[in-house]
Amino acid sequence: MLTHFEVDGFKNLRNLAIDLGPYTCVAGANAIGKSNLFDALQFLALTGSQTLNEAAIKIRGNGGDVRDIFAPGGKMSFAAEMITEKEFEDSFGKSITADQTYLRYEVDFELRDVTVGNNRNVSSIVVTREELKPLTKADAREKLGWAKKSFVESAIVGGRRKAFIETSEQERQIHVRHGNQGRPSLVSLSGDAPARTALSVYGQQDQYPVIMAARRELDAWMYLSLEPSAMRAPSEALAPDFISAKGGNLPKTLDRLVGQSPDHDVLAELADIVGDLVDVRSVTVDFDEARQVFTLQAQVGNGGVVSARSLSDGTLRFLVLGTILLDSGGSRLICFEEPENGIHPLKIQAMYWLLHDLSVDPEEAIGSENPLRQVIVNTHSPAFLALHKDNFDELLLGSKDPMNGSLVLTPVVAEGSWRKSKVKASAANVEELLRESFPELNFREFFAVEDEGDQ
């Protein structure tokens, strides 16, 4: 779970720092850089498992040129404060326990020319500084104003200790620690600075459980960009059994969930979840032995059972999100662009509440019934924005700095807000910030909040 994020030098993101709760909505006009926030999160996540150049190439809009993700100056920095899992399995099924779960990860990158082949210069991204350090329950009580005591007590373990990763190009060494005991492992750097992070290297080794937990957290971030063709497609027998970013593998994911819960009717529960949103009466998964594929079928209304290919885009979106909701081991951070797309206007509010159901309940202890899951959405829809009028703290209002074109995200702070940002908008002046981006919105109705003084 990502609780705080800082980025500087990525595309049009400059000195951006935001606090995040279980659910956050980034709202603003098109072409101001809202999507760049998701791209920055994705780039940081990819650096946990791939080389830096490989991570950059996978970011949309760069055309395969790693230079395109950098702002002028060729330097970039990130900081992410996160809550990780306490217990998990490595890739071989071995049980791992981390004794520190609240962490701050900082990393600086630089774009450099390196010589390859026959004296040819190419651009390469390198790490110039990296640090993974612990945060404590005291830090959580100060920083996580949205979290109740039961949440903090169950999610945060560990105390003050030395950093787990420290690198410095000046010292030409990487310090990597198992914990408080013993000296750190020292790795001397030769030649150029590293082309991948220490987190990506040591996060694969179970003797470093906290570093491994941080790497797994980055790996678990999910960027939903649901496509009707992917959601409708059957699943190959050997396909992954988890939902893809485009909504693929839905049938096989459901088949896995059914197998994991032999005493629980998963498909009936899914029908109940989406039945409140669309008129789905039942859901089934069929396996074709001859073709070796899984297919999804559903009964909608009083009609017969039909395949996923005959379901509407909106129905498929709800089925995908409902399946993610049922998968307690699913992604810890879900980024979702324009969730209102493909949804009937009368069902947009249902989408809003389903996204909240996906998010961890900050008033309860975490566990199988309350997984450490988080949702960030962005939108330019006045209709979707208007649903937040009673929950101002969920909003970050996007605008573009007229001086340098950078994205500005302003938290909306109502009376008694958990947000402590130095840059904030009160409910009394939000209208001015929103009027240009959302001219269709009825502002008098939007700000009609009872018994809230200046709101």
Image (cartoon, rainbow, N blue to C red):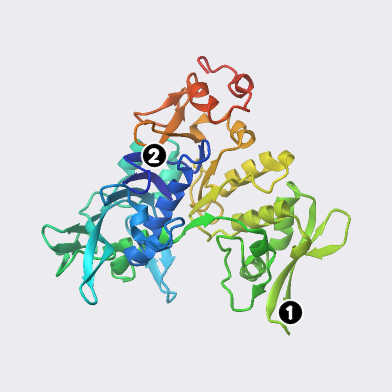
The residue carrying pointer 1 sits among few (fewer than 14), some (14 to 19) or many (20 or more) residues within 10 Å by Cα, namely: few
> What label does residue 212 carry, if any?
none
**In whole angstroms, how far apart are the C-alphas of marks 1 and 2?**
48 Å
- Splitting the image into 4 quarters, where does residue 299 fall? bottom right
Q: Which quarter of the figure has residue 269?
A: bottom right
Q: Give the answer, above or below, for where 90 lies relative to 298.
A: below
Residue reaching furthest to the bottom: 290
Q: Amino acid at mark 2?
A: Ile
What residue is shown at x 38% (from left), y 37% (from top)?
405
Q: Which residue is mark 1?
A: 288
- Image coords of residue 287 (percent x, y): 72, 76
Towards the viewer: 169 or 98:
169
Q: Position of residue 242 (x, y in %)?
A: 57, 66
**As drawn, is 96 to the left or to the right of 114?**
right
Relative to 25, does residue 249 appear above or below in the rendering?
Answer: below
Residue under circle 2?
18
- Residue 85, can we see it? no
